[in-house]
Amino acid sequence: MENREAIKIINQYDMNFHWNDGEPIPAEQLAEAFDLAISALERQVQDRWIPVTERLPEKDCECRVTEGDFKSVFDCHWNNHKKQFEVWSHYQDDYLPITNATAWKPIEEPYTEEKA
């Protein structure tokens, strides 16, 4: 099912699971449309900036972090054992802590071509 078709189904949905013309919407189409809508909303939630005052990552992960008043953005690593964001320093050949992180979000997965 394409996104446009899912949008059409959801837009024409009524509480009786019928099209606006009174014909019933097939259950499998309705379920697929709702699954697509839920996935889209979940992606929006996952892609938002999360203030560090709200929560920190629950496990080791690659993150994007904003720091302090500078509004700098870093790609870094969350070290769950040390409970800190770390950025790789090529000069020191080691991870250095980011001490003034204000918000973070997981780095999205890279694009991969869908196979038919």
Image: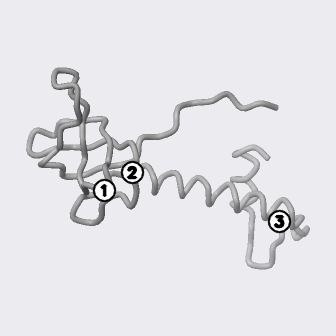
**Residue at far left of view:** 69
Image x and y of residue 96, in percent = 18, 38
Considering the numbered disc 1 on the image, is that residue within a helix, a strand or a loop? loop
Considering the numbered disc 2 on the image, is that residue within a helix, a strand or a loop? loop
Task: Name the residue nearer the viewer: 54 or 18.
Answer: 54
Q: Return the disc, 2 or 1, that comes first in the chain's sequence.
A: 2
Question: Dot 3 surroundings within 10 Å: few (below 14), some, or many (20 or more)?
Answer: some
Q: Is residue 69 left or right of residue 7?
A: left
Considering the numbered disc 3 on the image, is that residue within a helix, a strand or a loop? loop
Q: Return the disc, 1 or 3, that comes first in the chain's sequence.
A: 3
Q: How far apart are labels 2 and 3 at the CA level?
A: 46 Å
Question: Dot 1 surroundings within 10 Å: few (below 14), some, or many (20 or more)?
Answer: few
Residue at 57 percent of width and 30 percent of height? 111
Image x and y of residue 60, in percent = 39, 51
Is residue 106 shown above or below 116?
A: below
Q: Quadrant of the C terminus?
A: top right
Task: Name the residue nearer the viewer: 44 or 109.
Answer: 109
Q: Return the disc, 2 or 3, that comes first in the chain's sequence.
A: 3
- Three-letter amino acid code at the position of disc 3: Trp
Q: Which residue is mark 3?
A: 19
- Three-letter amino acid code at the position of disc 1: His
Q: Which residue is mark 1?
A: 81
- Three-letter amino acid code at the position of disc 2: Asp
Q: Is residue 8 left or right of residue 81?
A: right
Q: Determine the image quadrant of residue 12.
A: bottom right
Image depth: mark 2 or mark 1 in front: 1
Q: Which residue is mark 2?
A: 60
Image x and y of residue 81, in percent = 30, 56
Task: Name the residue nearer the viewer: 26 or 74.
Answer: 74
